[in-house]
Amino acid sequence: MPDKTKIALALGALSLPLLALGSTGFATAPDLDAGDSVRLLLLGDTGQLPVDGDPHKMDASQRARLRAALGAQDADAIVDLGDLFYNKAPKCGRGESPEGAGGKLDAHLYDHVGGLDLPVYMVLGNHDVGPIGEWAKRKLLGRRTGKRSKARERCYRLYAQQRPGEMIFPGEAYGVDLGPARLGLLHTSAPERTWPADELKAWLAEDPDDWQILGGHHVLYEVCDKTDEDFVLPWLQENELQPDLWINGHAHLLQLSVVAGVPAVTSGAGSKLREFPDCDPTAHEGVEFGVSQYGFAVLDITPETLRVSFRDIDGGELHCWQRGRDNPQGEACQ
């Protein structure tokens, strides 16, 4: 039997216990009562502890600069787009306490994006359920596969209990009513059969005049990094979901693209960085902006406009894009 076949069969056997996990379901977080104008800070891949002397991992002074920039944005909330812990999130047993979970996660998570007097909406990434299995399964068994970890997912649910109102995680997939928009967040490392399409669509339909912003850890479209991970857009299309904006981390850069009528924001440079000196993102069709440097994105939402401003580690603006109700392609900010 070829080695690849053996590996695929072994991975398939390992995935059988996950059938018992069933759907992630769909939870709702308390409404974000911010009025008709909402500002979200988008950043992902924040879970790396500071490292001195590595140009691709933040050191302590860079983390402090980023925290200061986040705190200066007069925002309403932070969305942390996954990989909340590197290299592999800890497990929490059934008897674990919220305080125990906090002891395991604080240095990677709260000390980076918490404590800024802003609620943090948490999204699970591949490193939050294990660093290799999700990618390997999809590579060998197809895009509909993935990985979950009940013990690691439990840590984040307990963590939200320890810091109620600060660290928000009502379920692996959940929605937040932002006022002028509805934000639906998915556990994109999980197998596609657990992504709650019907529940998500029903929740969005409760207020169809709101902007529909969907997101998860994984990219909708990417160049230079994660170029072979193309399972989000097909899932959206198969389930007749056409968000007004998709938000993600996973690729360790900042990028804006518009593909198949869906604008997508990648903000995955929250603590780790990848550089691509031989790849110009904007040379690729659909990419409006891309840069390999630490930073985050600011999303301003009004009833008529979505505005995305990419910021560097100190909060300086790198690029600004906006769209109205009838122009998903958008334009440079006025």
Image: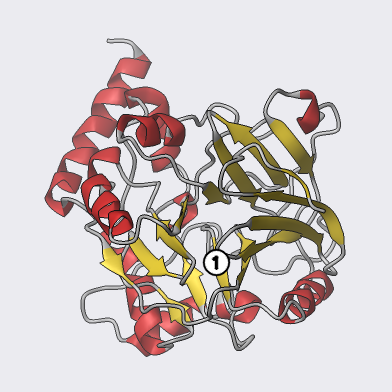
**Disc 1 on helix, strand or loop?**
strand
Where in the figure is residue 30, as x and y percent of width and height?
36, 79
Name the image quarter holding residue 173. bottom left
Furthest toward the top, the residue is 1
Where in the figure is residue 60, as x and y percent of width and height?
78, 74
| Rendered view: 46 above or below 247 | below
Name the image quarter holding residue 197. top left
Furthest toward the left, the residue is 20
101, 83: nearer the viewer: 83
Asked whether, in this view, residue 142 is left or right of residue 216, the answer is: left
Q: How is the image coloured?
A: secondary structure
Where in the figure is residue 3, as x and y percent of width and height?
36, 16
Name which residue lies at 37% across and 53% down: 187
Residue identified by numbered label 1: 79
Asked whether, in this view, residue 281 is left or right of residue 12, the answer is: right
94, 181: nearer the viewer: 181
Name which residue lies at 48% across and 58% down: 88
Name the image quarter holding residue 209. bottom left
| Rendered view: 175 above or below 134 | below
| Rendered view: 115 above or below 288 | below
Label 1 sits on what residue type?
Val
Let me know if residue 226 appears in the view: no
330, 87: nearer the viewer: 330
Name which residue lies at 62% across and 35% down: 258
241, 55: nearer the viewer: 241
| Rendered view: 178 above or below 139 | below
Asked whether, in this view, residue 292 is left or right of residue 94, the answer is: right
Specify the quadrant that holds the N terminus: top left
Let me know if residue 150 appears in the view: yes
Name which residue lies at 62% across and 57% down: 305
Pointer 1 local density, CA inside 10 Å: few below 14, some 14–19, many at least 20: many
